[in-house]
């Protein structure tokens, strides 16, 4: 295998990758050492060795790129780890706190862009000097608690800081602490390590390669160079990976074209057989001349040759089709696998966060992470970071009790939070649990009633599972006080929103006094979905199966009408019906043509709806392809895909679609489907939007139009008017000109330039009566331009009637 090309990476890029890897290792290993020292166990020598080598690696990499401050911090940390190896110091909690400050300094450093680095380093000179002194003080336990001065008489004389031919000279004008005299062994060891491992620019290639491999592989674990090529990886951007996935999906689609072609050739083969039989029959005719017999014999032989050749080629095509199908399937699965990474990659920072937050609150908490090798889609793992962070913070702040309280309850003083990932039934299941105080259902019931989220009678009937669902409402919190850590009712709402976005489920269960559990059920990948294909207005659409409650074939006789809404009864629940073509704004489908209606049951947190489609097509896996970002958010649509025939289809955004149905329901605009005929709803009131920043004018126009039988909504400025137009269905807009945020001329242009609303009539009513003002309004696209004196006669009502009728 040829060496990997790293010419696209700058040395600083490589340094940042190296630091990122080693910071993770330092964090994890220091926490592991702390847990051993807290239990008075002997510290694992291999962990101290790993810490020393991590600091040494950062030091060598920092020398290559000429970051003197980074060299100084790494060097003094390395000395501490060497001293711990020799038994001169013990890495207790206080020492580890100090060393973690050094780790945090590197964590800030690795996040900086190259252009921002010089200024940041200049600002960090004094901070770094104090940090180096603070860490160096650990080498002399008797001085740990003494004040640290920012100036020192002489710089350290360790050979590790002396310049070499290929390393920049360390600037000793920034004073460094004097290392204790009893650290001779430390300096000697460091010198030996530096002599053996001083990194030259020739060595940098190896450092670059290993670092980039770790970064591309998505793991913080060092790569064993003795494993040969088994762990060699290449760095691939997310965009390239997404394009690869799209191409792999298209190859799966293209292979399906072979089957129709093979069927056509098989049909041709049968026709060849029929031709051979006809020719054989003709040869037995007695009235044929010898010459005709000869020609028929030649024709029969030619037909037989064609039949044999066709059979042979058909067999070849069949074999090629099977091989190509298997190859495409394998390619597709490999690309999908490359989009996965271990669950551990997304939770690397959690142990440190839990440790620091617990210490801040005076609690003792142990975080257990299970299923670290479980493959997870990178996109899902990225989306999980914020929800899991909020849940862990909530568990520490509200769930885990203080050590004294836990002791009184007969619990271990150290609380346990467990985070676990696993695959089950084709889904990714993640559980977050703690052994804290849990949530009392009765307390939660009282909280729900106090917040007036339901009536007392309804609250009394709610099951424990239904009560737990209130935790996911925006702004809902059971905390008695709000702190900077938790209590605002935001975290669980974020988690629930994320789960909804990816089409998953989230539920909570509590055992009062013993803990709380949250269960995530998520798709294995966002790149592929199992979908139901339906036909709407003659076009294919897809619903993700994980977003569908039920699929039904409903007899028309089961449809009832209540409050001008069609509905069916499913499991003793009234479910409103809506036509998919009406909701999506497509050509209306003739619902009279069948006595049976295909219905897809969808839901959100509060409502369930049945959407009527033309027919069900099939169920299949779809390779999801994002819409062009230039389109923005397309209403009711989440993504695109391809059918088996290579035709494009759109994937329905169920959450958005349910919102669209609710708008139709609230506006009384649902088409009625009776148990006899499909008919439209009675003629509705014409809807008019009045946009004016003057409350007096708005109210005058609203009353005038309402008294004439129109339904009127109002907006207080042009921007609010434009947003209202896009979220509702209006027959007419009446607008002023001079308004804040967006004036009337701009509003008219927005309406007339939009493909969905360019036919919407607009009347401008303004105090401006100059001819140039009227001309500007009409040129913008207004259908009428009236002055506000029209309130005193019938001019406004006449214009409205002329445009949209009575």
Image: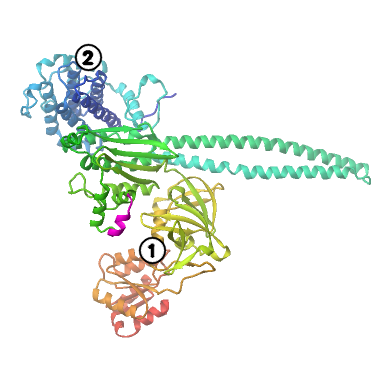
Residue 424 seen in this snapshot: yes
Query: Measured along the vertical axis of the image, is residue 620 above or below residue 798?
Result: above
Q: Characterize the local packing of mark 1: few (<14), some (14-19) or many (20 or more) Cα atoms within 10 angstroms.
A: some
Horizontal side of residue 490 vs 705, given as left or right: left
Query: Measured along the vertical axis of the image, is residue 727 above or below residue 65?
Result: below
Point out the frontmost of discs 1 and 2: 1
Residue at label 1? 663
Bounds of the magenta segment: 455-463
> Residue 401: horizontal and vertical position, in percent?
20, 38
Q: Is 78 within the magenta?
A: no
| Secondary structure found at label 1 | helix
Q: Nearer the viewer, residue 70 or 41?
A: 41
Q: What whole-number distance in Å separates the C-alpha atoms at marks 1 and 2?
A: 75 Å
> Residue 374: horizontal and vertical position, in percent?
38, 33
Q: Is 460 within the magenta?
A: yes
* Res. 387 image quadrant: top left
Horizontal side of residue 171 vs 384, given as left or right: left
* Res. 106 image quadrant: top left
Query: Measured along the vertical axis of the image, is residue 130 above or below residue 310?
Result: above
> Residue 102: horizontal and vertical position, in percent?
18, 30
**At x 27% / y 68%, what residue is drawn?**
717
Residue at label 2? 192
- The total number of labels drawn is 2
Q: Characterize the local packing of mark 2: few (<14), some (14-19) or many (20 or more) Cα atoms within 10 angstroms.
A: some
Q: Nearer the viewer, residue 462 or 334?
A: 462
Q: Nearer the viewer, residue 646 or 117?
A: 646
Residue 772 seen in this snapshot: no
Give the colouring mode of the picture: rainbow
Q: Main secondary structure of the magenta part?
A: helix
**At x 28% / y 82%, what residue is drawn?**
789
**At x 36% / y 57%, what residue is drawn?**
606
């Amino acid at each position: 295998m040829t060496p990997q090309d790293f010419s696209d990476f700058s040395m600083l890029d490589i340094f940042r990758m190296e630091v990122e890897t080693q910071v993770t290792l330092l964090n994890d290993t220091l926490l592991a050492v702390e847990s051993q020292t807290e239990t008075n166990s002997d510290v694992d020598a291999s962990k101290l060795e790993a810490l020393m080598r991590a600091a040494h690696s950062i030091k060598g990499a920092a020398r290559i790129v000429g970051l003197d401050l980074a060299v100084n911090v790494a060097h003094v940390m390395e000395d501490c780890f060497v001293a711990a190896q020799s038994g001169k110091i013990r890495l207790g909690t206080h020492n580890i706190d100090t060393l973690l400050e050094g780790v945090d300094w590197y964590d800030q450093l690795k996040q900086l862009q190259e252009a921002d680095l010089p200024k940041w380093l200049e600002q960090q000179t004094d901070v770094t000097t104090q940090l180096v002194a603070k860490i160096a003080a650990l080498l002399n336990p008797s001085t740990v608690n003494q004040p640290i001065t920012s100036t020192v008489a002489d710089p350290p004389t360790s050979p590790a800081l002396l310049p070499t031919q290929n390393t920049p000279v360390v600037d000793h004008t920034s004073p460094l602490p004097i290392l204790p005299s009893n650290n001779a062994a430390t300096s000697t060891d460091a010198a030996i390590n530096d002599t053996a491992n001083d990194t030259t620019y020739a060595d940098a290639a190896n450092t670059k390669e290993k670092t980039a491999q770790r970064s591309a592989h998505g793991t913080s674990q060092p790569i064993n160079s003795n494993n040969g090529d088994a762990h060699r990886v290449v760095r691939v951007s997310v965009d390239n990976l997404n394009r690869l996935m799209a191409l792999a999906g298209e190859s799966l689609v293209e292979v399906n074209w072979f089957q129709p072609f093979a069927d056509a050739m098989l049909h041709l083969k049968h026709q060849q057989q029929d031709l051979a039989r006809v020719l054989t029959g003709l040869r037995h005719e007695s009235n044929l001349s010898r010459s005709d017999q000869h020609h028929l014999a030649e024709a029969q032989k030619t037909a037989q040759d064609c039949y044999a050749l066709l059979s042979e080629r058909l067999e070849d095509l069949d074999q090629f089709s099977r091989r190509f199908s298997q190859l495409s399937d394998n390619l597709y699965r490999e690309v999908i696998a490359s989009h996965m990474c271990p669950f551990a990659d997304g939770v690397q920072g959690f142990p440190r966060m839990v440790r620091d937050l617990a210490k801040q609150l005076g609690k003792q908490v142990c975080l257990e992470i299970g299923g670290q090798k479980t493959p997870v889609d990178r996109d899902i793992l990225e989306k999980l970071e914020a929800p899991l962070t909020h849940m862990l913070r909530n568990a520490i702040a509200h769930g885990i009790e203080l050590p004294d309280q836990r002791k009184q309850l007969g619990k271990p003083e150290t609380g346990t939070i467990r985070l676990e990932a696993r695959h089950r039934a084709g889904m990714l299941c993640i559980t977050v649990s703690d052994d804290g105080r849990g949530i009392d259902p009765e307390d939660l019931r009282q909280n729900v009633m106090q917040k007036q989220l339901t009536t007392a009678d309804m609250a009394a009937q709610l099951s424990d599972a239904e009560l737990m669902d209130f935790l996911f409402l925006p702004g809902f919190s059971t905390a008695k006080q709000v702190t900077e850590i938790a209590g605002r009712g935001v975290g669980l709402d974020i988690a629930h929103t994320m789960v909804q976005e990816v089409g998953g489920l989230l539920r909570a269960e509590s055992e009062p006094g013993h803990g709380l559990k949250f269960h995530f059920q998520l798709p294995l990948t966002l790149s592929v979905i199992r979908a139901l294909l339906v036909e709407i207005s003659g076009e294919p659409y897809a619903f993700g199966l994980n977003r569908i409650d039920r699929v039904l074939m409903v007899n028309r006789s089961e449809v009832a009408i209540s409050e001008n809404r069609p509905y069916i009864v499913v499991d003793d629940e009234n479910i409103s019906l809506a036509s998919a073509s009406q909701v999506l704004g497509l050509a209306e489908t003739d619902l009279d043509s069948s006595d049976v209606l295909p219905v897809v049951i969808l839901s959100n947190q509060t409502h369930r709806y049945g959407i009527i489609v033309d027919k069900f097509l099939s169920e299949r896996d779809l390779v999801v392809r994002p819409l062009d970002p230039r389109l923005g958010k397309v209403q009711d649509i989440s993504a695109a895909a391809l059918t088996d025939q290579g035709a494009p289809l759109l994937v329905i955004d169920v959450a958005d679609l349910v919102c669209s149905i609710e708008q139709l329901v609230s506006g009384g605009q649902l088409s009625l489907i009776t148990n006899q005929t499909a008919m439209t709803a009675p003629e509705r009131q014409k809807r008019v939007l009045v946009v004016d920043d003057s409350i007096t004018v708005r109210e005058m126009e609203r009353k005038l139009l309402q008294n004439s039988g129109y339904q009127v909504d109002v907006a207080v400025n042009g921007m609010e008017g434009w947003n209202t137009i896009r979220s509702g269905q209006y027959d007419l807009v009446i607008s002023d000109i001079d308004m804040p945020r967006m004036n009337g001329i701009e509003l008219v242009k927005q309406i007339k330039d939009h493909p969905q609303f360019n036919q919407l009539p607009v009347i401008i009513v303004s105090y401006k009566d100059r001819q140039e003002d009227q001309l500007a309004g009409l040129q913008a696209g207004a259908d009428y331009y009236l002055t506000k004196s029209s309130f005193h006669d019938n001019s406004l009502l006449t214009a409205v009637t002329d445009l949209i009728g009575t």
